[in-house]
Image (spheres, grey):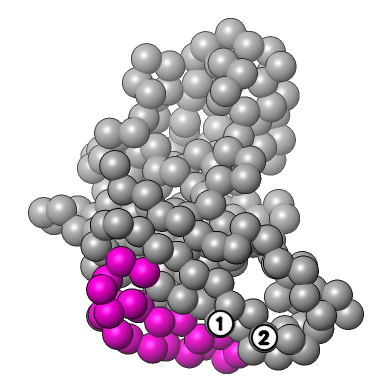
Amino acid sequence: EAGVAQSPRYKIIEKRQSVAFWCNPISGHATLYWYQQILGQGPKLLIQFQNNGVVDDSQLPKDRFSAERLKGVDSTLKIQPAKLEDSAVYLCASSPWTSRFSYNEQFFGPGTRLTVL
Amino acid sequence: GQQLNQSPQSMFIQEGEDVSMNCTSSSIFNTWLWYKQEPGEGPVLLIALYKAGELTSNGRLTAQFGITRKDSFLNISASIPSDVGIYFCAGLSYGGSQGNLIFGKGTKLSVKP
């Protein structure tokens, strides 16, 4: 079974530029998450989708971050404009479950490492 | 807000030694999860704990859900070089139909052959 795919793996941009990340979850997984992992920290949830609906985006900086999951499959996360403090690894994860039990079985992708200069 | 204190931050051990790490919080959690992350990869779930007092093993790994529901421990016995990585605890609390998952800052494990 293919895992969670993410692209690009690395991205370097200058502050105030825009950037987009793409995630393809495991086939059939209903729940998709985006996490931000700053160097030396654990992952922090940015947004959770169930199918194509947003379940939790309470920690998403909505003035500059946006995410969508059209058709309940692939997802994109966008930052516009980027700040220096956005430098981090952006992880996508998916789960076959919905509701609160979805966290018990999450599969993470390899992440996209973003450097903002 | 909820926070997890994970310790130690890093460990340098000799191959064959046992390892212990823990996670504490002032908040109560319904589930504790332990992950391992290797360079350039996402975290991989090692053990999930669902009940206070629960002790669960996965090969050489053993984890426990603290009685107070505010802490958890992970032990690795007879470490080998491939145990190298960063180990994260994560606490899950339920609010309504959804959960709230927070991660510790990780314990970086180095194993000397």
Give the labeled residue for mark 2.
B18
Q: Report the number of discs.
A: 2
Residue A96 showing in the rendered view: no
* Above or below for B7 versus A40: below
Give the labeled residue for mark 1.
B75
* Above or below for A34 versus B68: above
Q: Is residue B69 magenta?
A: yes
Figure quadrant of residue A1: bottom right
Instruction: Check if mark 1's residue and mark 2's residue have beta carbons within 8 Å.
Output: yes
Residue at the far right: name it: B113
Looking at the image, which residue is at 57% across and 91% down?
B59
Residue A41 showing in the rendered view: yes
- Residue situated in front as seen by the camera: A37 or B75: B75
The location of residue B69, given as percent across then percent down, is: 27, 71
* Residue type, numbered disc 1: Asn
Which disc, if any, is residue A69? none
Q: Residues within 10 Å of mark 1 (few under 14, many from 20)?
A: some
Tell me the subunit letter for badge 2. Answer: B
In the image, is B25 to the left or to the right of A89? left
Instruction: Write down the region rendered in magenta.
Output: B49-71
Q: Earlier in the sequence, mark 1 or mark 2?
A: 2
